[in-house]
Each structure stands twice: as structure tokens, then as C-alpha cells.
Amino acid sequence: MDHVPKEVRSKIMAAVHSRGNTTTELPLAKMLRAAGIRGYRKHWPVAGKPDFAWPGRKVAVFVDGCFWHGCQCKYLPRTNTGFWRKKIDANMRRDRRVARSLRRDGWIVLRIKECALRKPSSLARIVRALGIAK
């Protein structure tokens, strides 16, 4: 049983945005600026609209929220579990489809989970993909 009324839950879920997320996109943007990595474009109009893209180098970075993209660090809600499992599985299938499409077009695709975002290895993966010396 949800601990908030249906109308309140609906407003909470409607407030979840796919852009400018304070737990995924904004922290990575801050890390990139601090590392002096420039030249990215946000939501470049290619398959999946990557959160960060370097079109000239064909590098796309997606920063995935753990819950929405099926990370093992998050649990499914106890109510309406079937719905959530189906929703998250569909998100993961879409992620794979988008990555395949971009790779076919010659892009390097990186997916960084929210829980791994602040690890130094995440920034190192981006630097390596861009082929820049840091």
C-alpha cells in the first residue's frame, strides 16, 4: 500500500524529469567542468538523445538513474510490482536498442549509473573514450 494518496503520488511522478536531473546530469556536468572537459552538447538529436554528446568525436554519454534503469542497488516497490518490473524492463530494452543503433552509426556509447557517477572511474571512462590526455 502506498503511503500517500493517489493524487499526490501522481504529482510526485509528474515532477520526475528526464533533463536537468540533480542526481545524474547536473553532477556529471559539474565533474566535466571541474576536469576541464569541454565541447559537449546536451541532448544531441541522435538516437536516444544522449545526456552528453561530443558529435565531432562521436561519443555519447547517458547518465542513468538507478531505479529507472534497473540497477541492482535499488529495489522494486512492494506495490504494483508487476507494473514496475515491466516498465523497468522496457527501459532497459530501449537502452540496449539505442546503444546498438548509435554503435552501428559509429558512436562510442557510455552508460553511467547514478550510483557509480562520483567514482573516479566514471570520469576516466569518458576521458578514455574522448581520447584526451588528462
Image (cartoon, rainbow, N blue to C red):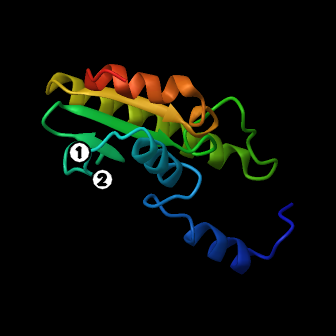
Quadrant in which residue 11 is drawn: bottom right
**Residue 55, position in %: x, y?**
16, 39
Q: Secondary structure at mark 1?
A: loop
**Residue 49, position in %: x, y?**
28, 48
Quadrant in which residue 106 is drawn: top left
Horizontal side, residue 116 vs residue 91: left or right: right
Quadrant in which residue 54 is drawn: top left
Q: Residue furthest bottom?
A: 7
Q: Please give the residue where the numbered disc 1 appears in the rendered image.
A: 39
Q: Secondary structure at mark 2?
A: loop
Q: Residue at x 45, y 44 (%)?
A: 34
Q: Is residue 121 above or below residue 41?
A: above
Q: Please give the residue where the numbered disc 2 appears in the rendered image.
A: 42
Cβ–Cβ under 8 Å for marks 1 and 2: no
Horizontal side, residue 19 vs residue 118: left or right: left
The crowding category of the residue bearing disc 2, from other C-alpha atoms within 10 Å (few below 14, some 14 to 19, many at least 20), is some
Which amino acid lies under the numbered mark 1 shown in the image of this protein? Gly
Horizontal side, residue 36 vs residue 14: left or right: left
Figure quadrant of the C terminus: top left
Q: Residue at x 19, y 44 (%)?
A: 46
**Residue 121, position in %: x, y?**
53, 22
Q: Residue at x 43, y 33 (%)?
A: 93
Which amino acid lies under the numbered mark 2 shown in the image of this protein? Lys
Frontmost residue, 111 versus 9: 111
